[in-house]
Every structure is written in C-alpha cells, then in structure tokens.
C-alpha cells in the first residue's frame, strides 16, 4: 500500500502575483528528509516563508510556502523533490512509494577543464551555467596568468547522472560557449577516479591561526558589530510534551535559514515529529520544533542540550564564516561553508560569492578550495586593495 507517484509532491501556484506558492510533500519518513528538501528548494533560488512538518516516524506530511524567481523551473523542481523522497517502485503498472532498501551510491565525479581569456564577471557567468545545468561544484581551482589567460578546474557531479554521455558533454560545451563567446579557448570534461577526488582532503599549508579564527566550532567570545548572538534565541523545554523536547527558536531571517536548522538536526541524528516555521513582521522568524533522539527519547542530558543549542545558535548567527586577509600586495577572501556529515554542502555558495564580487566590480585572480574538518573553505585572491573591502 502506498501513495500515487504524482501525489508525493504537489505544487500549487499562487493566484495573485507576489503571493507564495505552496509545496506539499506526502511520503514515507526518513531522518534528514526535511534537510534534503530544504537544500533542493534553496538550490532553485526559492525562499521558504512558512513551513509545517508532521510525522509519526513512518509517514510525513510537509507543507512549504515559497517565494522566488519568475524563471523557476517548477516541473524540474518537483522532479528533484520527488527524487529526494524514499524510492519509487511499480505495482501493477501504477507507481507507489516504498522505503529505501540501500543507500544510494556516491555520484561519479568529473573534471571540467576550461581555458579562456579573462574578463570581469567571467567566473560568475561560468558558475551560473553550471548551476543551470545542475552540475554541482565539489572542488575548484582557478588561476590567472600574467597575459590575461585563465585556467579553471572544476570537479563536478551531475544531478542528472548523464555527464558520461557525449550528448550531455556537448550540451555543456554549447551552454558555456553561448555565455563566454570568443573568450573561450578550450573546454574538456573527463571522469576522474577516487584517487583524484581524494586530493580535496584537508590542506596542510593554511596557517593554523586563520583556520581557527574562521572555522570555530563554538560561538566565539566576541563577534563583529554586525553579528550578535542576542538576535538569536534557542530555548529547550521538556515539560510541555510527555514524549518530545520542544525547541523554540527566534531569529532574523537569512537565505537558507530553514536549511541551516534542518542540516544541524540531521547531523545530530535528531528526528522532528512536528514543527512549524513562519516569518513575522520585519523578517523575524519563529520556529517551534518537537524533536526526539534516534532512540525515540527526549533530550534530557543537560550537556547534550547545551551542545545542540550552541550549535544551532552558531549556525544561525554565522551560517557562513567570512574573513578578509591581507598578504602583502594580495587580498584574500576566505569563506567557510558548513558541510553535512553526508558530504553535501550548502547550495550556490560559490555562485553567490562570485555574484557579490561582480557587483562590487572586483576581479578574481585565483581560487582554491579545501575540505577542512566539517567545513568547505574557499580561498579567493582578489585583484584590488584590502581597503575596498574593509571600508
């Protein structure tokens, strides 16, 4: 017995321009499903303005109200959301949903080598194409020569799992050529083995002082004036429910807020039985979550409560860790992006960084990426004085 395939995800578009669309998900439950759905919604450039989650541990019902771009590919979004739910099987010619029997195998990794003439905004245009084609950047290395030539190395995975085919490769070439025009010199895509992708392990030559300052696992004692822990409230209560721990969060909205919360709970193997999320006046968000541990019990250990609340507070105050470092004539922008224990990172980080730098009319000279502990670090060398960023 199950639910019809077409009813797993239902998207109801708003009748009035500016009103949110409503996404309903009705499927078997699994730990981390809310995180996976929020990641997909964030990847498609949508913002969740309201959410309701209800589950008995076996079956879940989730409703998201979302707003976003007029260019959203709703059909593709539904397909990706359906794919995140427990797998589909066929019975008597009708598709039903069943629980997954085996974890999915890791996706194949491809190396995209792109040589081109440099110009302002080039890297953002390239990352925009990769996002449109659903190619996920796992690692990147960008270098610029003195004569204005650029060599981009992107280690990517393909959401559509077709990059091994000539047709998919040619489609990627055509999209890149359409954006880059005559500045493209060459482009090549090849599959790489695990021994190559393993090179994205921890870097051994980043200064310890920098990594400790930019990658704190706990809330630092002092925060920049633009960040304050008083804007985030995380309260845990074990009295209101006989079976669940209630987590109440009040904070200011930011891009990917609900994903940051769901990702943290997934990493702690916490199950959500009921939850609601909504944005009030002036972008203040209120979140109520009734949760329990994997063993079905409340979180009563004070140390576990403190660890979870501290981690949630940290992720909400600083969803991305950013630092500007001067190294002689160079200025380096370092951005740390939290990575799930499953290895998946926050969507569109590199895309959004290149967009911001393009809007600041700044040039990127080189980019290196590293996997450091539970965070993904981008080290970007910029072609302008540090005063422009610190002013």
Image: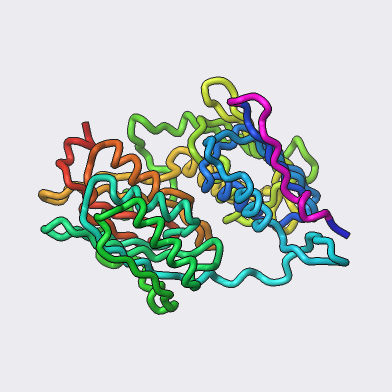
Residue 218 place in picture, x, y as percent: 44, 47
Report the front residue among 260 and 87.
87
Residue at horizontal 74%, vertical 55%?
Answer: 29
Residue at horizontal 28%, vertical 45%?
Answer: 121
In the orientation shown, which residue stands out farthest toward the top? 281
Residue 235 covered by magenta stretch = no
Residue at horizontal 51%, vertical 42%?
Answer: 45
Residue 188 place in picture, x, y as percent: 35, 69
Residue at horizontal 33%, vertical 46%?
Answer: 354
Q: Is residue 332 left or right of residue 10?
A: left
Q: Can residue 211 be seen in this snapshot?
A: yes
Question: In the image, is residue 246 above or below residue 181?
Answer: above
Report the front residue among 11 and 318.
11
Q: Which residues are magenta?
A: 3-18
Residue 237 place in picture, x, y as percent: 68, 37
Q: Quadrant of residue 357?
A: top left
Question: In the image, is residue 237 above or below residue 133?
Answer: above
Question: In the image, is residue 268 above or below residue 238?
Answer: below
Could you tell me which quadrant the N terminus lies in? bottom right
Report the front residue among 252 and 218.
252
Q: Quadrant of residue 87?
A: bottom right
Q: Can residue 276 be seen in this snapshot?
A: no
Residue 65 place in picture, x, y as percent: 65, 35
Q: Is residue 119 left or right of residue 30?
A: left
Could you tell me which quadrant the C terminus lies in? top left
């Amino acid at each position: 017995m199950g639910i019809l395939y077409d009813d797993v995800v239902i998207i109801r578009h708003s009748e009035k321009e500016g009103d949110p669309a409503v996404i309903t998900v009705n499927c078997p439950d699994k730990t981390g499903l809310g995180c996976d759905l929020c990641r997909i919604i964030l990847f498609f450039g949508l913002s969740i303005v309201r959410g309701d989650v209800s589950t008995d541990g076996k079956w879940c019902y989730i409703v998201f109200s979302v707003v976003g771009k007029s260019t959203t590919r709703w059909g593709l979004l539904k397909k990706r959301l359906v794919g995140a739910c427990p797998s589909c099987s066929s019975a008597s010619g009708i598709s039903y949903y069943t629980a997954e029997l085996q974890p999915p195998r890791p996706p194949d990794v491809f190396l995209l080598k792109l040589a081109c003439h440099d110009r302002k905004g080039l890297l953002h245009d390239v990352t925009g194409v990769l996002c449109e084609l659903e190619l996920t950047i796992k690692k990147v290395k960008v270098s610029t020569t003195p004569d204005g030539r650029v060599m981009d190395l992107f280690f990517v995975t393909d959401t559509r799992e077709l990059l091994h085919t000539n047709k998919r490769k040619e489609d990627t070439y055509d999209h890149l050529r359409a954006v880059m025009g005559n500045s493209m010199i060459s482009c090549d895509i090849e599959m790489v083995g695990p021994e190559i992708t393993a090179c994205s392990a921890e870097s051994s030559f980043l200064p310890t002082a920098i990594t400790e300052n930019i990658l704190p696992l706990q809330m630092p004692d002092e925060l920049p004036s633009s960040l304050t822990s008083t804007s985030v409230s995380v309260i845990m209560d074990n009295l209101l429910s006989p079976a669940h721990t209630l987590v109440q969060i009040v904070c200011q909205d930011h891009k990917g807020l609900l994903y940051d919360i769901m990702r943290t709970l997934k990493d702690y193997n916490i199950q959500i039985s009921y939850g609601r999320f909504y944005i009030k006046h002036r972008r203040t968000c209120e979140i109520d979550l009734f949760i329990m541990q994997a063993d079905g019990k409340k979180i009563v250990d004070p140390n576990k409560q403190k660890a979870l609340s501290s981690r949630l507070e940290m992720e909400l105050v600083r969803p991305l860790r950013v630092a500007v470092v001067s190294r002689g004539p160079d200025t380096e922008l370092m951005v740390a992006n939290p990575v799930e224990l499953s290895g998946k990172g926050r969507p569109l980080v590199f895309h959004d960084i290149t967009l911001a730098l393009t809007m600041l009319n700044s040039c990127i000279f080189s980019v290196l990426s590293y996997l450091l502990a539970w965070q993904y670090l981008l080290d970007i060398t910029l072609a302008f004085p540090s005063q422009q960023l610190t002013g």
